[in-house]
Amino acid sequence: MAQWLEDIELGNRIDLGPWVMDEAEMIAFARKYDPQPLHIDPAAAALSPHGGVIASGWFIVACWMRAMIRQRMEQTAKYEKPESDSAGNGPKPQNGPSPGFLDMQWPTPVRPGDILTFTATTAEKILMKSRPQWGIIRSANEGFNQKGEQVLRFTGQGMVMRRPQ
């Protein structure tokens, strides 16, 4: 859900729900975007240090992004008037583009059938001097498998509108 920069609380954690890692989807994605044997060839992957097919890190991030967008869409659907904020007053705040991710890591391999849980926690607000009507939110993003092992971590950044004066 879009909020004004001023209304976003640091430390706010969003749970993005479970995500089941389907082997066919993992392999199809990797064939198109990251065609390394450990992601697309079960026989070759069995000989790798991981002992089997693992998800491309880019597939994991794409799943995180889809979970984030799904959560945003569910929250946005709660608005009755898309042109107003949650109180029904004036223009509704909007999310802007992302200037990019920082420090992306995949500390534990993701395997077919793993159930991932993604989270995003607001970590920092930055005012933009070049665009005073916007700010940047930095968030600590993580993914964990069903064993509680961390499989993804990165700092996300997104532009957020400031409340009109």
Image (tube, rainbow, N blue to C red):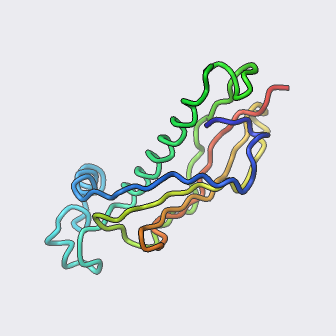
Q: Quadrant of residue 82?
A: top right
The residue nearer to you, when weighing 101 against 141, is: 141
The residue sitting at the right extreme is 165
Establish if 143 lies above or below 10.
below
Quarter of the image containing the N terminus? top right
Q: Residue furthest left?
A: 43
Q: Residue at x 62, y 35 (%)?
A: 95
Classify residue 8 by image quadrant.
top right
| Image quadrant occupied by the C terminus | top right
Where is residue 96? Give x, y as percent.
61, 34
Which residue is pictured at 58% across the width and 42% down the height? 98
User: Residue 115 location, x and y as percent?
Assistant: 38, 62
Foreground of the two, 136 or 83: 83
Left or right: 13 in relation to 54 = right
Residue 34 percent across, percent down from the top left: 30, 56
User: Where residue 63 sits: x, y (%)?
Assistant: 41, 51
| Depicted 61 relative to depicted 79: above or below | below
Tag count = 0
Left or right position of 153 against 123: left
Between 1 and 98, the one nearer to me in the picture: 1
User: In the image shown, does 83 or 154 lie closer to the viewer?
Assistant: 83
In the depicted structure, whether residue 146 falls above or below residue 23: below
Residue 77, quarter of picture: top right
Q: Is residue 14 left or right of residue 148?
A: right
Q: Residue at x 42, y 61 (%)?
A: 116
Q: Residue at x 57, y 58 (%)?
A: 141
